[in-house]
Image (cartoon, helix red, strand yellow):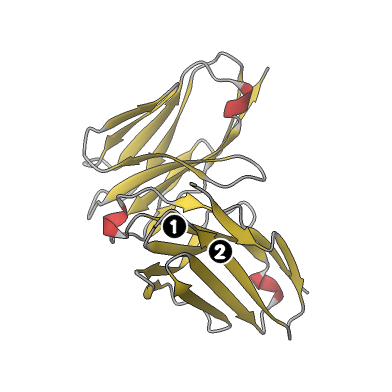
Amino acid sequence: DTEVTQTPKHLVMGMTNKKSLKCEQHMGHRAMYWYKQKAKKPPELMFVYSYEKLSINESVPSRFSPECPNSSLLNLHLHALQPEDSALYLCASSHRLAGGKHEQYFGPGTRLTVT
Amino acid sequence: ILNVEQSPQSLHVQEGDSTNFTCSFPSSNFYALHWYRWETAKSPEALFVMTLNGDEKKKGRISATLNTKEGYSYLYIKGSQPEDSATYLCAFDNQGGKLIFGQGTELSVKP
């Protein structure tokens, strides 16, 4: 199984809502990533987990809260978002963090709209 | 700020044409250079991870070369097919796992 799954596919939320994005992989990968992608822009790294520990936080606002409950799951908890946070949120995983030398496997993304 | 530049931004070719695009990246502190293909409504798919200067990699009709001293990589597609239509992204890693993506080259292959 070389698939990274993400749920939900689409999410519309108000600025006062709390919601979560989920990502799952069963490839035994120990590095997992969250990216944000706005239209016509490249994906931007948000967070990296390595062996279930937060390894990189790209100065992301605290209204985004990542969680890695086990080696197969990665969540992104959302609270008090702004309309400018509307974007495609991509999850990825790789065998290890190891100097970026391992290809990353991406999920299809969650299209988030904040109203 | 690290810049990863891809050119051209978009490309329209006829079926059977061969084509190539460029990824430029900083030449210092190089760890790896990734190429991904991203079809509309699908997940980005890894094509190559390149780590050594002079690397050449091939997957079917697609190949890539790497020059870390001058900071560029080329992606070549031989005999383009409509199913090659996608956005091709390169990503540069100089910090051990943190990928910085270019804006992509959008390829459209007409039958």
* Amino acid at pointer 1: Ser
Residue B86 location (% of width, % of height): 59, 35
Identify the image quadrant of the N terminus of chain B.
Answer: bottom left
Chain letter for mark 2, please: A
**Residue that appears at 42% across and 67% down:** A71
- Dot 2 and dot 1 within a common chain: yes
Q: Which amino acid does label 2 sit on?
A: Cys
Against A89, is B69 above or below?
A: above
Residue lying at 58% horizontally and 83% vertically, measured from the top left? A63
Q: Is residue A39 visible?
A: yes
Q: How crowded is mark 2: few (under 14 residues within 10 Å), some or many (20 or more)?
A: many
For residue A19, what is the image quadrant?
bottom right
Give me the chain letter of mark 1: A
- Above or below, comparing residue A65 to residue B10 in the picture: below
Helix, strand or loop at disc 1?
strand
Depth check, front residue: B16 or A1: A1
Q: Which residue is drawn at 32% across and 60% down?
A: A97
Where's residue A89, x and y in %?
59, 62
Callout 1 crowding tier (Cα within 10 Å): few <14, some 14–19, many ≥20: many
User: Which residue matches tag 2?
Assistant: A23
Q: Circles 2 and 1: CB distance less than 8 Å?
A: yes
Percent x, y for residue B60? 43, 22
* Label number found at residue A82: none
Residue of label 1: A93
Q: In this view, does B64 lie to the left or right of A79?
A: left
Callout 2: helix, strand or loop? Answer: strand
Q: In this view, does B39 lie to the left or right of B50?
A: right
Determine the residue positioned at 29% across, 48% down: B32
Q: Can residue B94 be seen in this view?
A: no
